[in-house]
Image (cartoon, helix red, strand yellow):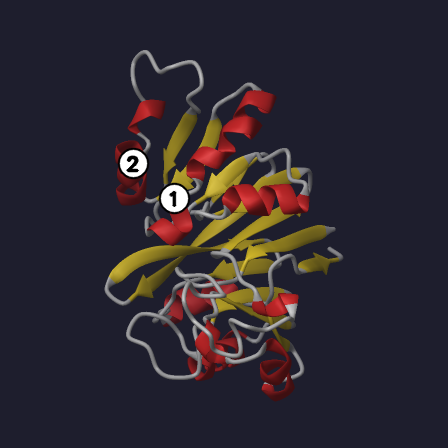
Amino acid sequence: MMKITLLGTGTSQGVPVIGCSCEVCRSGDPRDHRLRTSAFVEWDGCKLLIDTGPDLRQQLLREGIAAVDAVLLTHEHKDHLAGLDDIRPIYFRQKQPMDLFAMQRVLAVVRKDFDYAFRTNPYPGAPAFNLHPIRYNAFRVKDVEIQPIQVRHLALPILGYRIGPFAYITDASYVADAEIALLSDLDVLVVNALHREKHYSHFNLEQALQFVERVRPNRAFLTHTSHHMGLYADVEKILPPQVTLGYDGLQIVIDK
């Protein structure tokens, strides 16, 4: 059995947005409250964290996550990376460096932003990381095979990930046909849908639904959603039967 937890489903500003008084930001529905986008995958004895945004501490505490086998980074933007230091308690508990998988360019940003973790004589409270540069070939964490998916975020190459019957893609504005071919026979797809209007670097709702139609998973969940999308309860009414608007803390189970 695979379990996917959507730790956060919001954009770089989260929802509510600071200073905004729109109906979504004032909503009393907890599904309208969105931390920065991240996900946690448990399968075949392996625990994988996808992205480490600035709300990571809150997310790990909320879900009671105390063990992580590896971190998969999609790209280096701060809403997907800034919380990496919150891995420290897990590193202290597990007593071994945390494995990080990302493109070489992204790992260079990790080294710069968290330089104290890579010094010759780091201070005792610093975390430790094993950096694994990846490109487009499949790799393994424990016995789980992970297939990177090439995605464009405007002009920036970033990665999504396929893990068995599940795939996770965020911040996409374009995915090539060759990469869509790697997404055949999915049970669950999680994909970004920013809002309803077109955007230069993210799928909007229409584009996300078109992408779902091309991939044809059994189920799809939308993430990286802004307050401009509208109230959760209203958006759910207009989605196809196999598509759900994701929300923070949503758990998805695949019985495979």
Instruction: Please tell me in which quadrant of the rendered image residue 4 appears.
Output: bottom right
Few, some or many residues within 10 Å of mark 2 (<14, 14–19, 20+): few
Q: Is residue 172 left or right of residue 239?
A: left
Q: Residue at x 31, y 44 (%)?
A: 106
Give the x, y percent position of residue 83: 44, 42
Give the x, y percent position of residue 250: 66, 60
Give the answer, above or below, for where 241 lies relative to 66.
below
Give the x, y percent position of residue 131: 38, 31
Q: Amino acid at mark 1?
A: Ala
Tell me the residue that label 2 is attached to: 113
Element on which disc 1 rests: loop
Q: Is residue 79 left or right of residue 232?
A: left
Question: Which disc number belongs to residue 82?
Answer: 1
Mark 2 or mark 1, which is nearer the start of the sequence? 1
Q: Is residue 12 left or right of residue 236?
A: left
Q: Is residue 36 left or right of residue 221?
A: left
